[in-house]
Amino acid sequence: MHFITVFLLQDQDKEYVGFATLPNQVHRKTVKKGFTFTLIVAGESGLGKSTLINSLFLTDLYKDRKVPNAEERINQTVDIVKHTISIEEKGIKLRLSIIDTPGFGDAVNNTESWKQIEDYIDQQFEQYFRDESGLNRRNIQDNRVHCCLYFISPFGHGLRPLDVECMKALHEKVNIVPILAKADSLTQAEVFRKKMKIREDIKHFGINVYQFPECDSDEDEDFKKQDQILKDSIPFAVIGSNVQVESKGRKFRGRIYPWGVVEVENPAHSDFLLLRNMLVRTHMQDLKDVTRETHYENYRAQCIQNMTRMVVRKDSSSRKMKRYTSLTHSVISSLTKLRRMQEVLERIQEQMQHSQRGGY
Ligand code: GDP
């Protein structure tokens, strides 16, 4: 008599194939390639855009900057200036491109202030579309703009008409993150009221700013709380400074006033840290994904639609031409036949007249 023993395979007894290392493989490859991120800053000049960028990335991107005088500003157009820096942190390389828009809102007539920004974003999409459809797709440089920090003045009541028009011109092309500039010039209650008014205006004018992704239900409570704080902070009220100050034995980026010191990175003073964490630590990849999956896809679909329409138009006009040509041919051949018949008739008539005359 034989006894057969059957062992049920437990999870830990399963043979190890090795695909669990896939995330590590992806990680190694992407780290080797490095990361890129492109940010555009828009909003009237003097709102602290350059200062904030320097504070955000702890650099001095604007060493050679020349601020135009009042006369130069009257007819100034928005020039697009691109700064690229490579930052490395714990072996991870990031190529950061900052697109600055000096001259925005400076001219007497600002009706088309945003046009240059819109064109710049479109040009980057166009270049990517071309490269992607070309022969050499291996080394495509991706210069698509992933995020637009839009600076709003702390001195107005909500959005100005220029802000509304600019944001509406850009919101289908880029992730707009609204910023309430120079928050240190407002009291806490004013910051609260301005934020409410700006959020109301955004809703009222149908502006689509960047939407933070929904939190997964299995995330822990602390993460969910932080995520809600982030969502409720829009527009981020920020303070920038290019200088380090020393107070009570501590060194920090800040601004010194006769009545006290403002700390850029202090959460009680501004949303600077929230913004930096969002941009760099938590949502950089999502901003890139939304750019690729939504904004670029819209551009690409529109491009293909236009191209198809052009081909159809060409095709239909060539078909019309063919129809016209064949119609002309058939008219010509009918006319020729008619003329021949006429000639035959004339000849018969002549012969009849001739034979009649001969008969007399
Ligand atoms: P941009 O033209 O928008 O790039 O503005 P700048 O960064 O050149 O800043 C214009 C002026 O505002 C400079 O004198 C800055 O020192 C000052 N500034 C920048 N950020 C802040 C801020 O957060 N609060 C205050 N009160 N002033 C600021």
Image (cartoon, rainbow, N blue to C red):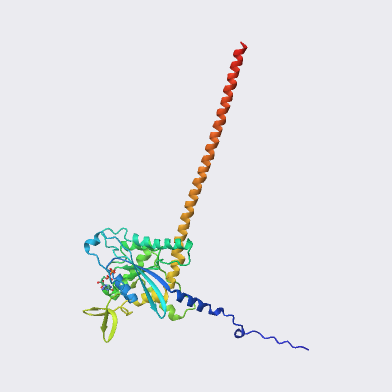
Mark yes or no: residue 317 visible: yes
Does residue 21 appear to the left or right of 282 in the view shown?
Answer: right
Considering depth in this image, is 173 or 152 the residue closer to the camera?
173
Residue 206 in sight in this render? no
Q: Is residue 146 above or below residue 328?
A: below
Name the residue nearer the viewer: 157 or 97: 97
In the current view of this chain or complex, which residue is farthest to the front? 136
In the rendered image, residue 122, in percent from the top left (x then y), is placed at 40, 61
Quadrant assignment, res 53:
bottom left
Q: Residue furthest top?
A: 360
Percent position of residue 225, x then y: 42, 78
How many numbered discs sit on the rendered protein?
0
Residue 311 at what x, y percent from top left?
49, 51
* Foreground residue among 70 and 141: 141
- Residue drawn at 24 percent across, 62 percent down: 73
Residue 2 placement (x, y as % from top left): 76, 88
- Figure quarter occupied by ligand 1: bottom left
Q: Is residue 332 left or right of residue 359?
A: left
User: In terms of image quadrants, where is residue 106?
Assistant: bottom left
Which quadrant does the C terminus fall into? top right
Is residue 175 or residue 311 the one in the foreground? 311
Quarter where residue 341 is shown:
top right
Q: Quadrant of the N terminus?
A: bottom right
